[in-house]
Amino acid sequence: MELLTLLALILIGLGILGIRIINQQTVAVVETLGRFSRTLEPGLNWIFFPFQRVAGLLSLRIDEVQSTVEVKTSDNMFVSLPVSLMIRVTPERASDAWYKLQNASGQISTWVLNTIRAIAASMTLEDLFKDRDHLVTQVENALSEKLAEFGYVLEAVLVDQPSVSHDVQASFNRVVAAKREREAAEQEAEAQRIKTVRQAEAEAEAQRARAKGLADSRKLLAEGLRESLADFEKYNVNSSEALTVLLETNRIDAMRDIGKHGNLLVLDMARENGQQGALLGLAARIAKGGNPGETKEHGAQHPQ
């Protein structure tokens, strides 16, 4: 009786010792006599103690593996690339994640380093700054299958801003600045060309307008002279004398307009007193309605 009681107590103790409580988002790897047998899911579990034991616990949460990779680009630039991998353990392949990798973070970082170096070797420094999506895609394609062999899932690859030495960065900035200055100079030259063309077109239009105005003015002047000559012909004044009167009238009008401005000195050398007197006499005869030709003949006979 005492033996049965002892056996019962031993079984109860073993049962209690075999209870295992697994936390949420955690998987436990169970070994039976040193060999993998199964995994335990979150919650209340039991193992056959002492023949079975929990060899280890694996978190099912996403883990971040950070690395800083020194790479050499195709244009011989040395660049530091901060890279972060988001990985998690696949529950169905927890044994591979536990047994196949001795140091998961370190070994994955090494794979990342080698993969990125191989990809960056075919890219220029400008490509690394402008087309990091291409680098991310290549890393995902290269590492997803490899990580799956060891029970991990690659959730995301994050490549941060590349960093270069201050000398390289200054040179790169000078190249970009020179390119921007060249574009600005081209734009400024184009603007100047357009401005010159517009000015030339405006000047040509103004010349056309002035030429038209001058032609219209000459046309009006010719029309006015024609009408004035027609009026002189009514008094039997020949065209030569009529033109003389008209020119003198224009000269007097010009002198009057000049005198309105003041502070001007005008020296009139164009007319002689005898000519001016003849013009005044002609104008007087026309005003009286006489015949200039007859008056001239009478004046020739007077001395007799």
Image: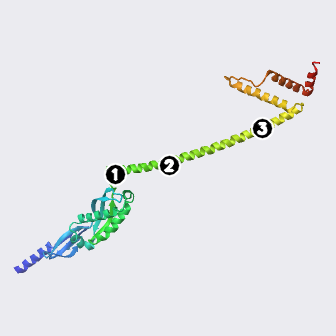
Horizontal and vertical percent for residue 297? 92, 25
- Please tell me the numbered disc located at residue 168: 1
Q: Which residue is mark 3?
A: 220
* Mark 2 vs mark 3: in front: 2
Q: In what quadrant of the picture does the N terminus appear?
A: bottom left
Horizontal and vertical percent for residue 123? 36, 61
Left or right, residue 195 beside residue 151: right
Q: Foreground: 294 or 260?
A: 294
User: Quadrant of residue 215 in the image?
Assistant: top right
Amino acid type at mark 2? Glu
Q: Give the class, few, some or many, for how many residues have Cα within 10 Å of label 2's Cα (few <14, many ≥20).
A: few
**Is any part of residue 193 visible from this angle?**
yes
- Please tell me the numbered disc located at residue 186: 2
Q: Give the class, few, some or many, for how many residues have Cα within 10 Å of label 3's Cα (few <14, many ≥20).
A: few
**How has the structure been colored for display?**
rainbow
Q: What is the distance, in whole Å, between disc 2 and disc 3 at their CAs?
A: 50 Å
- Please tell me the numbered disc located at residue 138: none
Q: Earlier in the sequence, mark 3 or mark 1?
A: 1
Q: What is the distance, in whole Å, between disc 1 and disc 2 at their CAs?
A: 27 Å
